[in-house]
Image (cartoon, grey):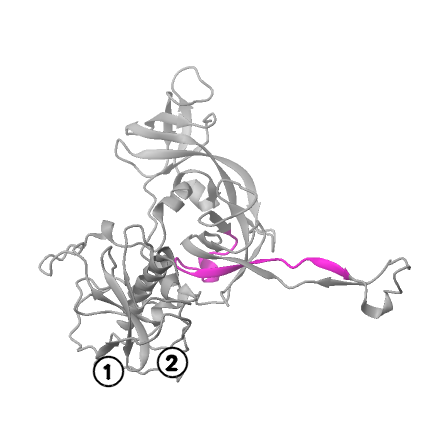
Amino acid sequence: MSPDKNRLNTSLGLAVIALAATMAGCSTMSKLNPFGSDDSDARPPVATRSGTPGGSSSVDPGGSVQPAQNEPNMVLVSQAVPLASGAPEEYTVQVGDTLWDIAATFLRDPWYWPEVWYVNPQVENPHLIYPGDVLALVTIDGQQRITNIRASTYRLSPTARVTPLAESITSIPYERIAAFLSKGLVLEKSQIDQLPYILSTRGDHLMASAGNDIYIRGGQPSPNGTRFSVVHIGDELRDPDDNALLGYQGIYVGVGAQSRGGDPATIALTDTNREALAGDRLIPETVDIPLNFFPKSPDLNIEGRIISVVDGVALIGQYQVVVLNRGARDGLAPGDVLSVFQAGEQIRDRFAGGSFLGSGSRIMGGEIVTLPDEQAGTIMIFKVYDRIGYALVMEATSDIHILDAVRNPI
């Protein structure tokens, strides 16, 4: 295996460790808080370095492991969790790693990392992973786990309780979803009603562009200097399953910064792709998106579709943002992982029912058969609203298109 692959595998392992540790600190496997208290009075079980060779292997399938009452860091494992082929025994976290990469390095299916992550109580802030941390495969009570065996200097000393979150490893690359914050998205009607809107343009202008000032009303008061993305409300977006209105396409117009507060407030446009019109909405560029969640399979069964893609491309690839017709009301939450499936093609079976009469005959009939849906990739939810969800494409093994199905990973 190449050094780059080993590094990726190691990075994934780190992510797995973080999630498992969180789960271990809970009394149940549901509703985990990966960033809970790092303090533990429990004496952890003895861990030994894994003797698993660098090849395809899996956790011992001999049954569930019941942790002792005084060992809250142990994880209840309900099934064997296969390791990735060539999973390393040890990995040093690098700058630029993500939890997803680290989990994929150690595990065949990254969303299982909560079941193998083990919190090391000797590490400061064990729920967070930093560049320079060393993750390793260990064996605890006969089960393989991933844990942080050596912390880096990125962590603060035990006497300082302020955690340098900006340096910790995030679940997904933030720069990949930056476009979501500013350039084209789907807006629910309830969101639109809460956003400030352009009232008019300063001077004798019916429309505004870079270099113009605009007056806005609505939304929450913001301090001077706050940056906004201007979005034009476009076409309706309806659920392909029941034709229900989900929201409206947001068309990116440009950006500006607030120069004067009040009602109305003044925004100076600094960059535009098209003219800004009265009624266009403004989205603060301080939208909060959590980056330290852990990938997992959804708690409920999800059957949905991709209904839009940010930037409007025809073919969807890795690290692009897609919009789903499923949201919080359907049980989706940040960190949920879904598989993408291309709909099976419909073809005519010329051989069924005697419709094929020979090479010289004209073939007019035959049964219509729908081929199986084929898996095309993996996506991770990073933000949800009531009826829509935003996801980042983590893996694309084939072309992904709008209206492709999304389901729980298999």
Residue occupied by mark 1: 69
Q: Is residue 30 visible?
A: no
Where residue 230 appears, as percent x and y from the top left, is 41, 33
Q: Identify which amino acid the numbered label 2 is placed on.
A: Asp
Looking at the rendered structure, the secondary structure element under dot 1 is loop
Q: Are marks 2 and 1 in contact (CB under 8 Å)?
A: no
Mark 1: amino acid: Gln
Q: CA distance from mark 2 to mark 1?
A: 22 Å
Q: Residue furthest front?
A: 2
**Location of residue 260 (image quadrant):** top left
Q: Is residue 115 magenta?
A: no
Q: Is residue 327 left or right of residue 353?
A: left
Q: What span is colored magenta in the figure?
A: 324-348
Q: Nearer the viewer, residue 42 or 224?
A: 42
Indicate the position of residue 175 as horizontal and vertical percent values. Answer: 36, 44
Residue shown at 86% from the left, 65% from the top:
355
Q: Residue at x 19, y 52 (%)?
A: 164
Tell me, yes or no, whether the highlighted magenta stretch contains residue 331: yes
SS of the residue under disc 2: loop
The residue carrying mark 2 is: 60
Q: Nearer the viewer, residue 4 or 10?
A: 4
Say left or right for 336 vs 264. right
For the view shown, which residue lies furthest in the left direction? Answer: 159
Quadrant in which the N terminus appears: bottom left
Q: Residues within 10 Å of mark 1 (few under 14, many from 20)?
A: few
Q: Is residue 364 left or right of residue 383?
A: right
Whichever of callouts 2 and 1 sits on the residue coming sooner in the sequence is 2
Residue positioned 49% across, 65% down in the render: 409
